[in-house]
Amino acid sequence: MTSLENLETQLELFIENVRQIHIIVSDFQPQSQTVLNQKLQSLVHGLQEVDKLKSQVQDVHVPLEVFDYIDQGRNPQLYTKDCIEKALAKNEQVKGKIDAYRKFKTNILLELSRIFPNELSKYRAIRGEE
């Protein structure tokens, strides 16, 4: 089991424990005190286990935006999808600009060759384009 899988398992157990504590506390009965104490001890133990695992996942970096997705109740995997879609859109935008600049270069060279043929041929000779 990898360190990330270990952490995931511990977090799932921790979340389940919190859920069970919520159930006990929301309808608290005096006879539930022992079970509640056990669950709270288990909660503390779970936090200790998560703390032990932190050194194994030091190299994992999570973008802050992922936490925003989680806070908004969205699936964090959508973050990757959204990033790819944004990158593709930006790529298309940049591609359009490059195409526009190429057309501009072609048009300006045509006009310059028509108006200043000698100067443009010297320019092309200097640039090594002839």
Image (spheres, rainbow, N blue to C red):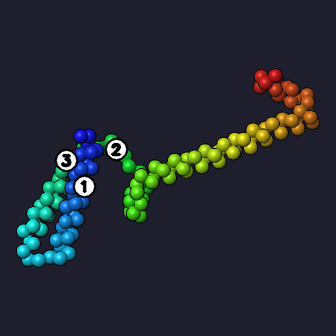
Q: Are marks 2 and 3 in contact (CB under 8 Å)?
A: no
In the rendered image, which quarter is residue 72 located in? bottom left
Question: Which residue position holds label 1?
Answer: 12
Q: Secondary structure at mark 3?
A: helix
Whether residue 33 sits left or right of residue 57 in the image: it is left
Q: Amino acid at mark 3?
A: Lys
Compared to 46, does 58 lie above or below?
above
Mark 3 vs 1, N-terminal side: 1
Residue 11 percent location from the top left of the image: 25, 54
Secondary structure found at label 2: loop
Q: Residues within 10 Å of mark 2 (few under 14, many from 20)?
A: few
Residue located beneath label 2 in the image? 60
27 displayed left or right of 114: left
Instruction: State the SS at label 1.
Output: helix
2 or 118: nearer the eye? 2
Structural distance between the alpha carbons of marks 3 and 1: 16 Å
- Residue, x 65% and y 48% (percent of image)? 93
Q: How many neighbours does mark 1 have within 10 angstroms: few (below 14), some (14-19), or many (20 or more)?
A: few
Residue 54 appears anywhere in the view: no
Name the side, left or right, on which 51 lies relative to 120.
Answer: left
- Compared to residue 117, the image places residue 79 above or below, namely below
Residue kind at label 1, given as amino acid type: Glu
Residue at 91% across, 28% down: 118
Disc 2 marks which amino acid? Val
